Every structure is written in C-alpha cells, then in structure tokens.
C-alpha cells in the first residue's frame, strides 16, 4: 500500500499563503482524510499564531487521481506573547527514518513570536513544547490507523526541533528542466 499525501494549507491575511506536505499509511483517501482531521488539526493549530489560519487539508492518493478536501478555516491557537516575527522565519523539524540518507524535514511558519525566541534561537521551553506537540500528533496518527511516513514509505521517528530559527522563502520557485527533443 503506497502512502497517501496530505497537503496542509495555511494563510495569514489575503496574501501570505504556505503549505506543508505529510505522507500517511492509510488504506484509502477517506481514511487518511479522517485521520488527518482527527489527529492533526488541534496540534497544527497550536503551532500557529492566532493571526494565522489553517485553511484545509488536501488528501490525495499518490498512485491515482483520487483526492478529497477537508475544509477547516480555523484560526491558530498559539499563545506566544509579543508580535509575530516575519513569516520567512520558520521552525525546522527533522523526522528521522530508518532509511539511509537525509531525514524528512518540515518548516513550520506562523508560530514564532518575539517572546518565543532570543537572538535567532528558540527558547529551550519552546523547543520542548513543539517536540511534545509533534510527538503527540504522530502518536495520534498511529491511534487513528494512519501513521506518518516519508514519501517512500519509511516510518517516521520522534521529531527533532532545531533551536536556530531557519530563514525560509515564502514561495520557492522550482527550476524547470527544459529538455530538448532528440535530433
């Protein structure tokens, strides 16, 4: 069974939009959507400032055209004090797998406020809180019967939060590889 793809859409105001992609082992798109809705909504909202919003989950089968959307339109519940720092500042989280090579990683935007960091580093209590939230989310996905994994299907281990704030573009432009036809 190939993993299902879960794309999470976020926004802040009318112009700031970003996504994160997860992969879940689930028997169907519907099962993955239900698991994402139940196990991921509350933790992801707690990693989002109140000025930002979780827009929707787009769940798709990686081997077919089957997909479903789960609309959310919910404001974040993060309680960090101070103002939100610019969205190109993000939290980098590694999700190690048993496979060789680079681990999976995610960049979380829309959470870091002035009071949660100092001199470009997350406070140690903030790192511990984020790790706890993400470990809980991964555990809840297992309980819902749709454990998180890499795109190639390798099970995720416990998340590791990088203390240094990562500067990340809001939208990365992908290079298009232009191939010329054979002569």
Image (cartoon, rainbow, N blue to C red):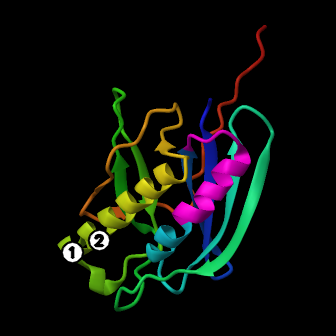
156 above or below 58?
A: above
Q: Is residue 158 left or right of residue 6?
A: left
Question: In the drawing, does residue 123 fall left or right of residue 137?
Answer: left
Name the element at disc 1: helix
**Mark number for residue 129?**
2
**Residue 41 counted in the magenta span:** no
- Mark 2 falls on what kind of element? helix
Is any atom of residue 167 visible in this view?
Answer: no
**With respect to residue 153, does 43 lie above or below?**
below
| Residue 129 coordinates in the image, percent (x, y) | 29, 71
Who's the residue at 46% across and 69% down the image?
Answer: 43
- Asked if the residue under mark 2 is in contact with the one under mark 1, i.e. CB atoms within 8 Å, the reply is yes
For the N terminus, which image quadrant?
top right
Residue 125's tag is: 1
Q: Residue at x 31, y 49 (%)?
A: 158
Frontmost residue, 173 versus 59: 59
> Which part of the image, by quadrant, shows the C terminus?
top right
Which image quadrant for residue 83?
bottom left
**Residue at 71%, 46% in the rendered image:** 29
Left or right, residue 103 beside residue 26: left
Residue neighbourhood size for the residue with mark 2, other residues' Cα within 10 Å, grouped as few (<14), some (14–19), many (≥20): some
Task: Determine the CA span between mark 1 and mark 2.
Answer: 6 Å
Q: Which residues are magenta?
A: 24-40
């Amino acid at each position: 069974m190939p993993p299902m793809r879960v794309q999470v859409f976020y926004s802040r105001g009318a112009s700031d939009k970003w996504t994160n992609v997860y992969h879940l082992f689930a028997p169907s798109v519907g099962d993955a959507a239900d698991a994402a809705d139940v196990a991921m909504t509350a933790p992801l909202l707690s990693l989002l400032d109140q000025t930002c919003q979780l827009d929707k989950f787009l769940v798709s089968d990686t081997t077919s055209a089957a997909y479903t959307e789960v609309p959310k339109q919910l404001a974040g519940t993060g309680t960090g004090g101070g103002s939100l720092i610019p969205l190109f500042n993000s939290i980098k989280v590694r999700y190690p797998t048993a496979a060789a090579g680079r681990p999976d990683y995610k960049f979380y935007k829309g959470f870091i406020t002035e009071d949660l960091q100092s001199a470009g580093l997350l406070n140690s209590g903030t790192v511990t809180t984020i790790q706890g939230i993400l470990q809980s989310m991964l555990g809840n996905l297992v309980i819902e019967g749709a454990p998180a994994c890499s795109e190639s299907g390798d099970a995720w281990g416990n998340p590791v939060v990088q203390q240094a704030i990562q500067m990340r573009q809001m939208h990365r432009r992908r290079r298009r590889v232009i191939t010329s036809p054979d002569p």
